[in-house]
Image: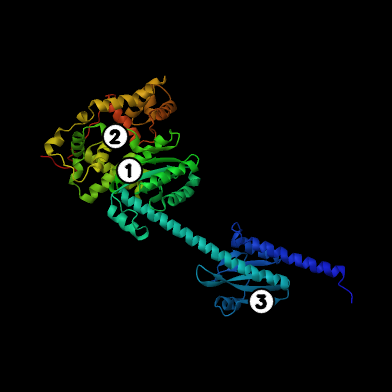
Amino acid sequence: MTGPTDDARSARTTGADDDASWARELLEQLRPTGRGVDRVVAWLAQAVRGTACLHDGDGTLLAGNPVPLDADLVADITAGRIASAAWGDPGRHLRLVGVELPHSGTVGVLAVSRTTAFDRRASDIVTHTAQVVALLLRARETNQAAHRLRRATSDLRLAILQLLMVEDTVSARRVAAGLWPGLLDTDTACVYVLEGRTEERDHIAEECLDATRERALVVRCPAMDAHVIVVAPHDATADALRSLTGRWPGLLLGGSAPHSLARTATAYGQAVSALAVARFRPDKQAVYAERTHPERLMDPAVLGAWTASLLEPLDTLAHHTRAELLATSRLGLEFTAVSAAKILGVSRNTVRARLERVEALLDADFSDLTARAVVHLALNTQVGLADDYRRPDRAETHRARLTDLLAGPALRTWAQDLLARLDADARDLRRTLRTWIAAGGNAERAAQSLGMHAQTVREHVRSAEPVIERQLLTGGSDLYEVVLAHLVLGELDEPVLGRANRDDPDSPVHG
């Protein structure tokens, strides 16, 4: 006997190599970085030198280029009567294979058409590709289901935060109890805000969940794309979050002082304020309680009486309406109407309408930064009063005046120390800042008063920020503290507030 010729051996080797080649290419589609169902079907068409497509049970094209199909054969496959079918005519040959569609539990059809008959190699490619397509569809459905679950969980966390922001702690606890038992079973909590690169926020949020072992409420901020908000009931959470700043270059962390859950909105404002300080710290971390704030230097009795007097017009409203207006005003004065709306989950027009109603009730002009600052002080004082706090009587509230509240050596020393930091700059940043505040934070109007360019005004204000460790151009608590410092020193006129507007049906009628 003689052995096979070289040509025969070469043919068998070439055929084996060819089989191994298409099999390797097909297996590549199962890698995590694979190209997906569309490209697998396109690869199939190229591999068999024909046309390929994938249909669902209703005949809708899912991938590939349309192929004329025999309706009876398709019906037999989608009904499960047969698993595959072949059909041939001179010049056109068709092969159909059933593919399970996991998202609907039905059977789709992978169809391949070519001009020559299907040999063993082409048939094997079609059969194995159908299996790969089924696996990819199943993996895609699993990934989509996981994504939907993550999205639903994220939306639920946001809903809980929004309930806390409007002081509805009962509903917030009820919603949280279903998925995270014990999460909000606490009397006090701190709010932290982490700021990193926007494209890294999802990863930072996941690390926050891991670091806190899901014992904290972690929310992707709906208003600021680079922020992650964490409501942390447990003391150990702070250290876990602080450790993240060392692992993420450029990550900032601002934290609030401990507050009751009903004061989540106040705590959030404190955390954002602390975040501004963190920008100027070497470790990129700051906690609100680390610096002295003007309200802590005021006479508590006078502060309480003045707050009650200023907010008295809101006392005639229904409890839920009053709470809604107070919560919205705190956030609306702290942030822009758009940001406050996103945090609260309402429209910006709703936020503006509520702010306008509070303006009318308090007879205040919120375009005036001094008015915004003192109303902001009253709102945050009101929410901080304990339930057993003795409400001042009518005589006390009528005697309480803003001038008395801003008097006192400790408060005056604080204001002098804060603004004196600006005196060392030859550009007279203090004068620019005072004029800019008097102009309502409008650089153009301030520039006209100062005889300089508006951009120069902005640069001066921006230069003042690291000196006094407060954000000014973005508004909010930091700016209001600086406004109060000017009021304490008499460098700005006190706003006129509290005149009853008898034409407003919401205003109380005084006898």
Instruction: Give coordinates of residue 296: x percent, y percent.
Output: 26, 34
Relative height, residue 57 to residue 276 (above, below):
below
Residue on which the image places disc 1: 267
What amino acid type should be assigned to the residue bearing mark 2?
A: Ala
Classify 10 Å Cα crowding around label 1: few (below 14), some (14-19), many (20 and above).
many
Q: Are marks 2 and 3 in contact (CB under 8 Å)?
A: no
Determine which of the numbered discs, if any, sits on residue 86 in the image.
Answer: 3
Q: CA distance from mark 3 to mark 1?
A: 69 Å
Furthest toward the right, the residue is: 1
Q: Earlier in the sequence, mark 2 or mark 3?
A: 3
Q: Camera-side residue: 388 or 405?
A: 388
Horizontal placement of 125 versus 301: left or right?
A: right
Instruction: Give coordinates of residue 263: x percent, y percent.
Output: 29, 45
Instruction: Give coordinates of residue 473: x percent, y percent.
Output: 39, 33
Q: At 14% across and 41% down in the image, what residue appears?
A: 509
Residue on which the image places disc 2: 373
What amino acid type should be assigned to the residue bearing mark 3?
A: Ala
What amino acid type should be assigned to the residue bearing mark 1?
A: Ala
Furthest toward the left, the residue is: 511
In this rendering, does residue 83 appear at all? yes
The N terminus - image quarter: bottom right
Splitting the image into 4 quarters, where does residue 5 fall? bottom right
Q: CA distance from mark 2 to mark 1?
A: 17 Å
